[in-house]
Amino acid sequence: MAIEVRIPTILRTYTGGEKAVEAKGDTLQGLIDDLDSRHAGIKGRLITDEGKLHRFVNVYVNDEDVRFLGSLETPLKDGDNVTVLPAVAGG
Amino acid sequence: MTSVSDDRHATATLSLPRTMVDQVMAHARRDHPDECCGIISAKDGAASRVFEMENAERSPTGFSFGTDSLKVYRAMDDDDEEPWIVYHSHTATEAYPSRTDVKWSATAGFPYWLLVSTRSDEDEVRAFTIEGTEITEVELIVT
């Protein structure tokens, strides 16, 4: 099952400059594992060593923030679209 | 004075149209006493559009992009624009990156940080690159 993942500029070094790539997974965790198998290293920019979603990124499934959907356990199905954006903040 | 790090920057100057600088300053004045934030996108290496963003913090001492991020990034992507400059205001201190700005800069994905200050009636607008913990001011050329 193919899910389109939109990649922000800052992470396109992992996707050979591609704005969007396809990946597979029943959950967001599975999708990120699959993404990392094709674009080695990208997982480390999305998930912390403790296995949580990085606070420096926001991930949306069908335009909903996954923090309100189940985070890495968010279920995915064919045709869903996933968007990764940098979290931007300062003081 | 020249330092090794200067070679990493594509340009030591940043050109912005007067209308954009005025829009950013007006946004900052409007949101004062809270900080404002937003994006100036680039296309083909030049400033393209100003996106005034919601400050989800609604705070005089901090900002974070709110739920309008998704729409703005998609608009840039659809028009082949790049996130180029992140701007925000300081409301009681100078227009210079804070420690929090430095902390977030590595992952925010912007080549330039534009800071404005609303601490007085006098407009303060300055531009910087932040690499690691190194802050370098770039000359802002308003055209």
Image (tube, coloured by chain):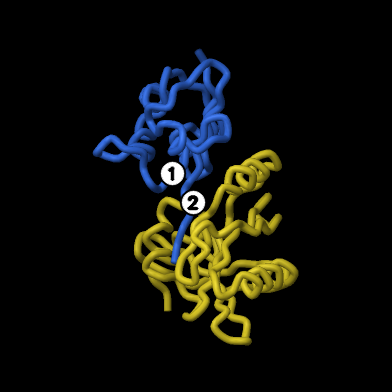
Chain colours: A blue, B yellow
Answer left or right for B44 relative to B107: right
Determine the residue positioned at 47% across, 21% down.
Answer: A76
Element under label 2?
A: loop
User: Where's the C terminus of chain B, which quadrant?
Assistant: bottom right
Question: What chain is tagged by disc 2?
Answer: B
Three-letter residue code for mark 1:
Val
Three-letter residue code for mark 2:
Gly
Determine the residue positioned at 53% across, 43% down.
Answer: A9
Residue A36 placement: quadrant = top left
Pointer 1 local density, CA inside 10 Å: few below 14, some 14–19, many at least 20: some
Q: Residue beneath label 2, please?
A: B109
Determine the residue positioned at 47% across, 80% down.
Answer: B93
- Residue B126 in view: no
Answer left or right for B133 relative to B96: left
Q: State the image coordinates of residue B54 (x, y, percent, origin top left).
A: 59, 57
Q: Residue placed farthest to the right in the image?
A: B19
Q: State the image coordinates of residue B99 (x, y, percent, origin top left).
A: 37, 68
Question: What chain is tagged by disc 1?
Answer: A
Q: State the image coordinates of residue B130 (x, y, percent, origin top left).
A: 43, 63
Q: Are circles 2 and 1 on residues that touch, CB within 8 Å?
A: no
- Residue B69 in view: yes
> Are discs 2 and 1 located on one and the same chain?
no
Pointer 2 local density, CA inside 10 Å: few below 14, some 14–19, many at least 20: many
The label number, if any, that marks residue B1 in the structure image = none
Determine the residue positioned at 59% across, 43% down.
Answer: B70
Answer left or right for A4 relative to B42: left
User: Where's the N terminus of chain B, which quadrant?
Assistant: bottom left
B70 to B131, vertically: above or below? above
Element under label 1?
A: strand
A34 to B71, vertically: above or below? above
B33 to B20, vertically: above or below? below
The label number, if any, that marks residue A57 in the structure image = 1
